[in-house]
Each structure stands twice: as structure tokens, then as C-alpha cells.
Image: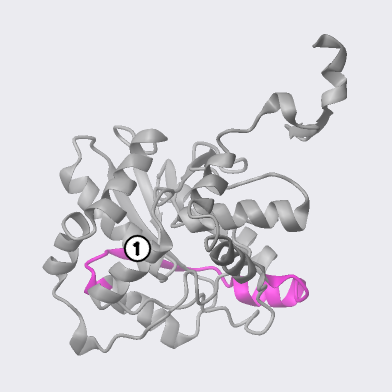
Amino acid sequence: MSDNISNNIAGEGCELLIPINERKPLKDIERSIIKTYRKGIWSKFIKAISDYKLIDEGDKVAVAISGGKDSLLMAKLFQEFQIHSKTKFELEFIAMDPGFHESNKKLLLENCEYLNIPVKMFESGIFEVVDRIAQDYPCYMCARMRRGSLYGKAQELGCNKLALGHHFNDVIETTLLNVLYSGNFQTMRPKLKAKNFEGVELIRPLFYVHEDDIRRYTVNAGISPMNCGCMVAAEKISGKRTEMKNLIKDLKKNFKDVEKSIFQSAQNVGMDSILGWVKDGQKYSYLDFYDEE
């Protein structure tokens, strides 16, 4: 099952349109990242980079901007990190146009200009291709093609890392989606090597950051993020991720730390207590090693 099963109003969507005259000055927005949102956003961003060694000396990072709230925040975090970090690295801000409506493209570019993000937009025509070859499963195919297109652009620009804006809630929702709908235990990882783009790693620096904190920052900063902008799957987008959000919300009523438990479950897999696993495409059963115990 794809990591990016669905972009919806609870995810990279546009929850609230902020009138331009209510936008805050850029210097206040930038200052708030380290001051107002130090605990909920900045410290968690830095911790993920440190814990998973996401940024190294001499890296050139392609920061992918979809136009949604998560990626816009990630771009600003990287700008602040580059200023304050002792580690020297380069940044490229890229935005892929898969076939956005002109109003969405305009909103994305205006937000980047407003936030002083020097974005490089490139066209891919993915929406048209997906509509032609995958009408029954557009979201899955679109996600795969988008990822490949971003990898390719990152490689073209000489970047060795591609940063995506998946956050803490994306991680736990993906974990549950795979358990409940695919019958496997898989989750997002904070970094992984691209299989078809040699020398490029995917990183997820918002790995510890909660969506509620991103939403609060976005609204308080007066930013109007765009929705997924998909003209192909407007009425076909899977509601499974929304179901997971609602399920977790219900579970929290009786289990306060359920989100933390789901997240940590992927770090505490008991290999001595599972029935089977898959490694490098090969399936294994605990019975294969039963006589060795």
C-alpha cells in the first residue's frame, strides 16, 4: 500500500483560507518557528535530524514543496536550520506541477514568494497520464509517479537527498492502514535509499512533528496552503486515511498514549514472537528456524 494513500482536508489540504491582509510579517513567521513553536515543531525537527542522521556535511538537499501546509513549514524549517546549524549543506526548493489548475499553481507560487522560498517549479503532466492509464486506482499510481518525478529532478539538480513533508500522524496512520487493510506490518521510515535513482536518499525530517502543531502554526502565521490539487481523483480519493484519523481519535478517548504506542511499535518488533517476515522480497516463517532454538 502506498505511503501517500490520500491527501485530504485533514492532511496536506487547505483547511482555512486566510485573507492576504491578515498575513503576518515574514520576520514574525520565521521567529515564531524557533520561539513560539520551539517545543512542538523546531525541537522535534532537530531531534529527527539528529536521531536518524538525516543531514550530513556537504549534503545538497532537494526540499519538495507540494503547496500544502506540511511542505511549506518544512521549507521554512530547513531555511532556519541552515542559518543556525554548524553543519554546512545546500538547499534546492522544488515543486512539481502534475497538472494543477492555474489557481492552485498561482497559490503555490504566491505562498512561496510570501514566505521567501526560492522554489523551482517544473511540469510533469502526471495528472493527464494517470487519468489515461489508471482511472480505477489514480491515487496509488499518482503517488508513485510523483515520487519518481521528484527523485529525477533532485538527481538532475545534483542533490543527494530528497526531503518530503510526511509527519508523525502520517507515520502512525500508514502503520494502521497496512495492518488493517493490507495484512502486513509496515510503516514509513525516516530515511531510505532510492532504488532507481543512485546516490539519492529520501528523508522525512517532520517524522516527530504532530499535525495539530503544523496546523496551528499555519493558521497563526496566516498561510493559506493549497489542497492536493488533483483534477483526476476529485471524487475517487480514498477515505481510508480519514478513517484511520477517526479511529485513532476514538482510541485516544480511552488510551491517552495510543499514538505514541503505535509509533513505538515499529521500533520494538519482537523478532522472537512473530510468525513470519519478509526481507529482500523473500518470505520467511519462524518455523524455518524453529529447530535452531
In the rendered image, the vertical position of residue 48 relative to residue 165, given as above or below: above
In the rendered image, the vertical position of residue 187 relative to residue 6, given as above or below: above
Specify the color scheme: one colour
Asked if the magenta segment contains residue 124, the reply would be yes
- Residue 255: x and y in percent read 54, 55
Count of numbered marks: 1
**Left or right of 36 on screen, residue 276:** right
**Left or right of 277 on screen, residue 52:** left
Q: Which residue is mark 1?
A: 213
In the rendered image, the vertical position of residue 140 relative to residue 264, given as above or below: below
Which image quadrant: the C terminus?
top right
Whether residue 53 is visible: no
Q: Nearer the viewer, residue 52 or 243?
A: 243
- Residue 280: x and y in percent read 73, 32
Q: Nearer the viewer, residue 268 or 136?
A: 268
Q: Residue 33's quadrant in the figure? A: bottom left
The residue at the point 59 percent across, 40 percent down is 266
Which image quadrant: the N terminus?
bottom right
Q: Nearer the viewer, residue 33 or 99?
A: 33
- Residue 15: x and y in percent read 42, 80
- Residue 91: x and y in percent read 30, 50
Asked if the magenta segment contains residue 268, the reply would be no
Q: Amino acid at mark 1?
A: Asp
The residue at the point 64 percent across, 58 percent down is 144
The residue at the point 35 percent across, 86 percent down is 17
**Label 1 crowd (10 A; few <14 / some 14-19 / many >=20):** few
For the residue labelled by badge 1, is the local secondary structure a helix, a strand or a loop? Answer: helix
The residue at the point 12 percent across, 66 percent down is 27
Bounds of the magenta span?
113-138
Q: Residue 269's quadrant in the figure? A: top right
Whether residue 85 is visible: yes
